[in-house]
Image: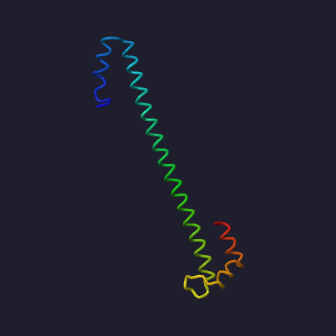
């Protein structure tokens, strides 16, 4: 539909006028390059967005794993719930403070 039978159009225009055929050739070339650049731009935007989402997901997973390891070490009764005493121990622990600071 768009550039399927462009040779027929070029042949007809070329038989009428060489300068107009040259201008048509330049127009078609510039149009094709413009569309290609637009598609490349959209592709780059999609890749950038996916990379940002994956990076954020990695940061969240890293923070979750660090916090889980801190809670696991400070959870005295092993019920995965933090009591006031365990939370006070969390605040006093240098390793917990370092882990929270890294997050």
Residue 65, placed above or below residue 45: below
Image quadrant for the N terminus? top left
Q: In which quarter of the image is residue 79?
A: bottom right
Q: In which quarter of the image is residue 96?
A: bottom right
User: Eyeballing the image, is 9 above or below 59?
Assistant: above
Q: Is residue 32 left or right of residue 82?
A: left
Coordinates of residue 72 in the picture (x, y in percent): 59, 80
Q: Position of residue 24 (x, y in %)?
A: 38, 20
Quadrant for residue 2, please give it.
top left
The residue at the point 72 percent across, 75 percent down is 94
Q: Residue sitting at 63 percent across and 66 percent down?
A: 103
Task: Establish if 5 lies above or below 89.
Answer: above
Nearer to us in this view, 89 or 11: 89
What residue sits 56% from the left and 86% below the top? 78
For this rendering, which residue is in front, 100 or 85?
Answer: 85
Give the residue drawn at x 67%, y 79%: 90
């Amino acid at each position: 539909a768009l550039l399927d039978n462009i040779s027929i159009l070029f042949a007809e225009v070329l038989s009428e006028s060489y300068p107009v055929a040259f201008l048509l050739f330049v127009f078609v070339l510039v149009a094709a390059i413009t569309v290609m650049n637009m598609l490349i731009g959209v592709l780059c935007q999609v890749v950038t967005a996916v990379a940002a989402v994956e990076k954020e997901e990695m940061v969240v997973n890293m923070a979750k794993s660090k916090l889980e390891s801190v809670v696991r070490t400070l959870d005295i009764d092993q019920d995965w719930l933090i009591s006031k005493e365990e939370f006070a121990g969390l605040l006093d622990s240098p390793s917990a403070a370092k882990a929270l600071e890294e997050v």
